[in-house]
Image: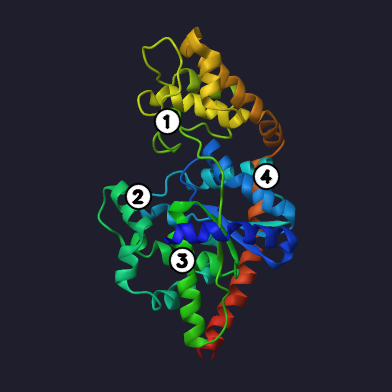
Amino acid sequence: MDSFTATAERMPELRARIAAHPEQFRVLTGERPTGRLHLGHYFGTVRERVRLQSLGVETFVILADYQVITDRDVAGNIRENVYEAVLDYLAAGLDPQSSTIFTHSAVPALNQLLLPFLSLVTEAELHRNPTVKAELAASGRALSGLLLTYPVHQAADILFCKGTLVPVGKDNLPHVEVTRTIARRFNERYGEVFPEPAALITDAPELPGLDCRKMSKSYGNAIALGMTADETATVIRRARTDSERSITYDPENRPEVSGLLTTAAIILGRDPGELADEVGDAGAGALKTLTIDAVNDFLAEHRARRAELTVDDAAAVLREGNERAQSIAADTLHEVRAAMGMLY
């Protein structure tokens, strides 16, 4: 049985435990702020964070700004991207009183965990990590030390706050396994300090981009959460379709049309094939209008809440979150140094 299948089979029991005793869990989740958050982020991760928070699970959300440069030369508009992400978090329902939102670079003690953690993994184990392989292939660059050690950085992100639960999709499951390995080896070598976090496999639908590829900022096929209704309408109207008048759902042969259908269907809770039948011979224009209306209606409340927030609000949330994360990281680092006999 492969690792993903075995983990998936444990999900019903884990979800039941979370629902019964949310206070026993601490979630660490987050993303690299490489651009604006989009609908794919919302359905893939943000909605799940809000759900766990509402259950009473203590939640930590990291904006891993240092990790932006794992596969690129420069950080880009990193400051703007971070603030934009915080505004979207708040508009989506994350409560800074319940969820700690912080930036990687603001917590130096977190990064100090990287050194002892690196001693617990081999070079061969890092090279075998499928996410490292995939990121390297996608980047088209030479393998950097930062990218090679990316899974260990993520282990530090999770373990600094003693996270016990990490929501992931199938592609990111290996990172949690690396983290569990590091926690186990540290405990065996130096004494019990870290829990072994569990992966919480999300069953969120994967929202395709406007061209039916994975929705991604780098592909230019994403609908950002912070777009206005007019901006959303513009990008959808510009989306490529094909020359056939009749609308059908056929991801293999008609990817662009199928991407629009899938986007509308996920938002509306409908079957894309049924939507295709309803649009029928009305053509691509009617399909785009359907998708525009679905997206704009869905995001209307999010946009209204976001319009009430300012960059100053985002900065205040980060200041508070960074302070809390710094305090927790310092305590954890003290424990680690004590276990290793390095308190002087």
Give SS at disc 4: helix
* Mark closest to the chain's N terminus, 2 or 1: 2
Mark 3 to mark 4: distance in Å? 30 Å
> Residue 175's image quarter?
bottom left
Mark 1 or 4: the one toward you: 1
Q: Hey, what amino acid is under mark 3? A: Glu
Categorize mark 4 by other alpha carbons within 10 Å: few (<14), some (14-19), many (20+). Answer: some
Which residue lies at the image location 55% right of the left edge and 21% below the top edge? 274
Q: Hey, what amino acid is under mark 2? A: Arg
Which residue lies at the image location 67% right of the left edge and 34% below the top edge? 302
Categorize mark 3 by other alpha carbons within 10 Å: few (<14), some (14-19), many (20+). Answer: some
Please tell me whether residue 320 is drawn above or below residue 164 in the rendered image: above
Mark 2 or 1: the one toward you: 1
* Mark closest to the chain's N terminus, 1 or 3: 3
* Mark closest to the chain's N terminus, 1 or 4: 4
Query: Is 51 or 245 nearer to us in this picture?
Result: 245
> Residue 91's image quarter?
top right
Q: Is residue 124 visible?
A: yes
Marks 1 and 2: in contact by CB < 8 Å? Answer: no
Which label belongs to residue 8? none
Residue, disc 3:
177
Mark 2 to mark 4: distance in Å? 28 Å
Residue, disc 1:
212
Residue, disc 4:
90
Picture coordinates of residue 37 (x, y %)? 54, 40
Mark 1 to mark 3: distance in Å? 30 Å
> Residue 233's image quarter?
top right
Mark 2 to mark 3: distance in Å? 25 Å
Q: Residue furthest front?
A: 1
* Mark closest to the chain's N terminus, 2 or 3: 2
Q: Hey, what amino acid is under mark 4? A: Leu
Mark 2 to mark 1: distance in Å? 25 Å
